[in-house]
Image: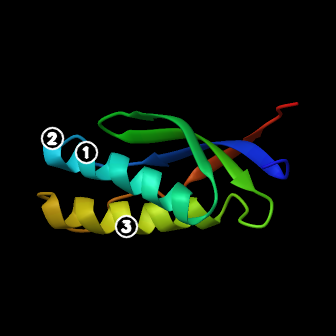
Amino acid sequence: MSDCLTWHLCWQAAYGHSFLAQPALSAWIRERLLDAHRRRDGVLIDFVLLPCEIHTLSRLTAATGHEGPPNEIGSIVSRRVRRDGPILGPTLRGGYLSHWIESG
């Protein structure tokens, strides 16, 4: 994985939504994070799941780019949070945030 870059990725919940609304939801999000990285030849180094934010440290290949897993995760998580949540409308506050972390 020499062509990998490390990224900090972040998704924020829209007002009124929570990623920790139910214990099953947080476990499901964890599995989706792992699965999205596996399918794209990436590595989920670590993650933090907060009520209104998801943060990951991810090693992603140059071919995959930092857009593959984040777009996939955002779409899947958004649908599930909307389905399980009490509020209609957008579940994520804008797109994801990404920052390249220089690692040598």
Please state which of residues 26 and 84 is positioned toward the viewer in this rendering. 26
**Label annotation for residue 2:** none
Residue 14 makes an appearance in the image: no
The amino acid type, in three-letter code, at marker 1 is Ala
Amino acid under label 2? Pro
The amino acid sitting under disc 3 is Ile
Question: Disc 2 on helix, strand or loop?
Answer: helix
Residue tagged by mark 3? Answer: 76
**41 with respect to 37 (left or right):** right
Q: Which residue is rendered at x = 11% and y = 58% of the image?
A: 86
Name the secondary structure under disc 1.
Answer: helix
Identify the residue under disc 2: 23
Circle 3: element type: helix
Distance, label 3 to label 1, CA atoms, is 14 Å
Task: Name the residue at 56% across, 61% down.
Answer: 69
Residue 8 or 82: which is nearer the viewer?
8
Between discs 2 and 3, the one toward the N terminus: 2
Q: Position of residue 82 (x, y in %)?
A: 23, 64
In which quadrant of the rendered view does residue 20 lie? top left
- Disc 3 packing (10 Å; few <14; some 14–19; many ≥20): some
> Where residue 2 sits: x, y (%)?
84, 47
Q: Quadrant of the C terminus?
A: top right
Q: Height in image: 24 above or below 41?
A: above
Mark in front: 3 vs 1: 1
Give the label on residue 27, or none: 1
Please give left or right for residue 45 compared with residue 73 in the image. right
